[in-house]
């Protein structure tokens, strides 16, 4: 859901309580739509994330540092100049607006004390982060808005900052329940109550409007025209109770998760009753924890998908091109299966030379090689002698025989290449940082999938830092490592692991090489099960059940000469069947 004005008010109060009096130590811009302010105060160091991503504008604390680009963007450099070292005086929200302002006490270029404002507008696709001076002039914005983008409101350096255009809706803090009930009585009867509230009341989200409708009428989408007088009166009382709840600052962070699979569904600031067992409603520790639980995992996946889009497109194009080539080669190979017919025709012409002459288009001859010696019709080339026609058929036979040998070898190599490209696509889904993507680019360059032109500029911008594999620790203390790409898979299995360690991999399914470090001990059944689950989780079968996972001592795993990265063979093994559990796997993760 979008972060509505009422919920954002509760978030703003929480941020103000925590950050007022803190200093901004550092400023980062890990992504084009994100700013991170690292602050320090009496409560210690905190990282505040300001995101204006179109699908997830938000502000909350994050626990771990984000990966930053090698060269900071221009807006990040400007914020470091004006904001770094400033003291946060207050964080305030204009009445019923999806925005808040961070008031900063700082100094200008001459060292004179002054105030600046970092304004965060969290309004869907129109979200922005704007830095304003003490005179309310815009210093710069994360997204500049000129006359071509908006004829109503420009956001450009040097202009005075103006509030977003007001909406033609009622302020809920100045609206009474009695007035709302009277307005509903005069409303269009075909419209549902939740849609009416959404269009009439400022700062309310669709979820909140449905909740009000449900509490008043027992139906989250009750048509206004079917409401009784009693339901209209109850709506006014429910609305008054809600606004008292907000005024008294009794808002609490609640997360809605689907009862069937535990997936996050929505969030709000009050207990939701409209879903009646379909959703689980749990209270989070804070609004920051709530927003992080709802947005962070999804946002991380979207950021990596955007950053890896070029690699994904290259690999998919290479895979599709190879698949078409393999289909054509297979068609040619199938055609060679009739080659014995060419040899047979050549033999028949040779056996019947005495009755054939040059210029004949067809000839009917006796097939001496069949049991009942039937007559067979043979097509001839009028330009060739009978001997040359026979040689033509023998040549077609030899050509088909050679083609079968070459095509069989080419198809085998092509299938290995296709298998490798499929494994790279799985590795792209495992990438968690720019370092992981850099290692994948290196792997694809070595494999010849990426050209020198495609890798040249990337190498200049990418830090030469080695990415690390996934690291887990089982419930009973065994270390488990999983490769993020084929280079890491080779390194783990062939270089790092001891011969006595246990190797895991999904059976005939693309996935990571997983190493259970025995460290001179006998692995427990619990450790083996958890390692197998990790292998299933880091595979193409992540969302399946009863996934077959092969396991064997590392000494049994070999790499054939000339094989692609990540490709190994093994003959002695056992198979376990496990169902991946994301929550259980993440609980074991160390880094």
Image: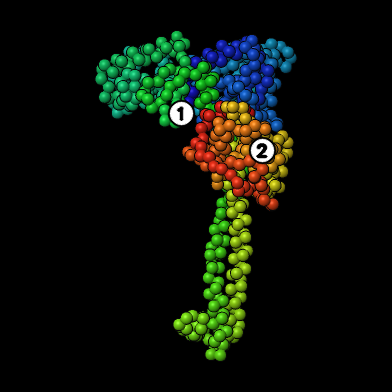
Alpha carbon of mark 2 to alpha carbon of mark 1: how far? 38 Å
* Location of residue 514 with respect to 367 vertically, above or below: above
Of 80 and 133, the residue lying toward us: 80
Question: Vertically, is 579 above or below 6?
Answer: below
Q: Does residue 393 appear to the left or right of 266 in the view shown?
A: right
Find residue 319 and report its horizontal and vertical position in percent: 58, 50
Q: Mark 2 highlights which residue?
A: 500
The one of 407 and 13 positioned closer to us in this rendering: 407
**2 and 1 marks in contact (CB < 8 Å):** no
> Label 1 neighbourhood size at 10 Å, few (<14), some (14-19), many (20+)?
few
Residue picked out by circle 1 = 262
Q: Identify the element where label 1 is drawn.
A: loop
Q: Residue placed at 56% from the left, 87% from the top?
A: 353
* Residue under the image location 58 percent in, 31 percent down: 524
Quarter assignment of residue 512? top right
Looking at the image, which residue is at 44% across and 31% down?
261
Task: Say which label, 2 or 1, has the lower sequence index.
Answer: 1
In this view, the residue in front, 521 or 297, is 521
Camera sees residue 400: yes
Q: How many marks?
A: 2
């Amino acid at each position: 859901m979008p972060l509505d004005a009422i919920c954002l008010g509760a978030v703003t109060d929480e941020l103000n309580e925590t950050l007022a009096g803190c200093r901004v130590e550092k400023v980062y811009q890990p992504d084009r739509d994100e700013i991170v302010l690292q602050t320090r105060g009496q409560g210690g160091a905190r990282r505040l994330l300001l995101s204006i991503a179109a699908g997830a504008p938000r502000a909350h604390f994050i626990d771990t540092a984000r990966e930053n680009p090698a060269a900071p963007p221009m807006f990040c450099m400007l914020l470091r100049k004006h904001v770094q070292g400033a003291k946060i005086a207050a964080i305030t929200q204009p009445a019923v607006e999806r925005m808040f302002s961070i008031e900063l006490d700082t100094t200008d270029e001459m060292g004179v004390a002054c105030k600046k404002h970092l304004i965060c507008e969290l309004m869907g696709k129109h979200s922005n982060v704007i830095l304003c001076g003490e005179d309310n002039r815009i210093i710069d914005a994360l997204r500049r808005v000129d006359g071509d983008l908006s004829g109503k409101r420009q956001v450009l350096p040097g202009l005075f900052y103006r509030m977003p255009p007001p909406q033609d809706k009622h302020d809920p803090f100045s609206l009474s329940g009695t007035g709302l009930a009277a307005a509903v009585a005069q409303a269009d009867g075909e419209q549902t109550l939740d849609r009416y509230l959404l269009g009439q009341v400022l700062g309310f989200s669709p979820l909140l409007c449905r909740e009000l409708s449900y509490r008043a009428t027992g139906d989250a989408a009750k048509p206004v025209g079917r409401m009784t007088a009693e339901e209209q009166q109850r709506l006014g009382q429910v609305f008054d109770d809600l606004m008292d709840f907000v005024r008294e600052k009794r808002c609490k962070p609640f997360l809605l998760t689907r009862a069937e699979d535990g997936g996050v569904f929505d969030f709000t600031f009050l207990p939701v009753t409209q879903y009646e067992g379909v959703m689980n409603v749990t209270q989070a520790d804070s609004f920051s924890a709530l927003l992080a639980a709802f947005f962070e995992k999804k946002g991380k996946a979207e950021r990596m998908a955007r950053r890896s889009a070029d690699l994904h497109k290259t690999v998919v194009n290479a895979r599709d091109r190879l698949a078409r080539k393999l289909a054509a080669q297979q068609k040619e190979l199938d055609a060679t299966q009739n080659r014995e017919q060419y040899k047979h025709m050549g033999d028949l012409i040779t056996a019947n030379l005495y009755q054939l002459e040059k210029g004949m288009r067809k000839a009917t001859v006796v097939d001496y090689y069949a049991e009942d010696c039937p007559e067979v019709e043979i097509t001839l080339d009028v330009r060739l002698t009978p001997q040359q026609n026979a040689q033509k058929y023998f040549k077609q036979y030899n050509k088909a025989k050679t083609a079968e040998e070459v095509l069989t070898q080419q198809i085998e190599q092509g299938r290995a290449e296709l298998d490798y490209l499929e494994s790279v696509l799985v590795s792209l889904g495992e990438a968690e940082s720019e370092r992981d993507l850099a290692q994948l680019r290196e792997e694809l360059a070595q494999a010849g999938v990426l050209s020198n032109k495609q890798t040249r500029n990337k190498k200049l911008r990418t830090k030469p830092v080695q990415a690390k594999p996934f690291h887990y620790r089982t419930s009973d203390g065994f270390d488990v490592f999983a490769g993020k790409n084929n280079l890491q898979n080779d390194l783990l299995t062939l270089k790092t692991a001891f011969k006595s360690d246990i190797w895991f991999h999904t059976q005939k399914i693309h996935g990571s090489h997983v190493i259970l470090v025995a460290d001179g001990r006998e692995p427990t059944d619990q450790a083996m099960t958890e390692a197998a689950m990790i292998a299933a989780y880091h595979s193409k079968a992540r969302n399946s059940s009863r996934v077959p996972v092969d396991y064997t001592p590392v000494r049994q795993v070999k790499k054939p000469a000339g094989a692609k990265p990540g490709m190994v063979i093994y003959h002695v093994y056992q198979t376990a069947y496990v169902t991946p559990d994301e929550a259980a796997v993440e609980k074991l993760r160390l880094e």
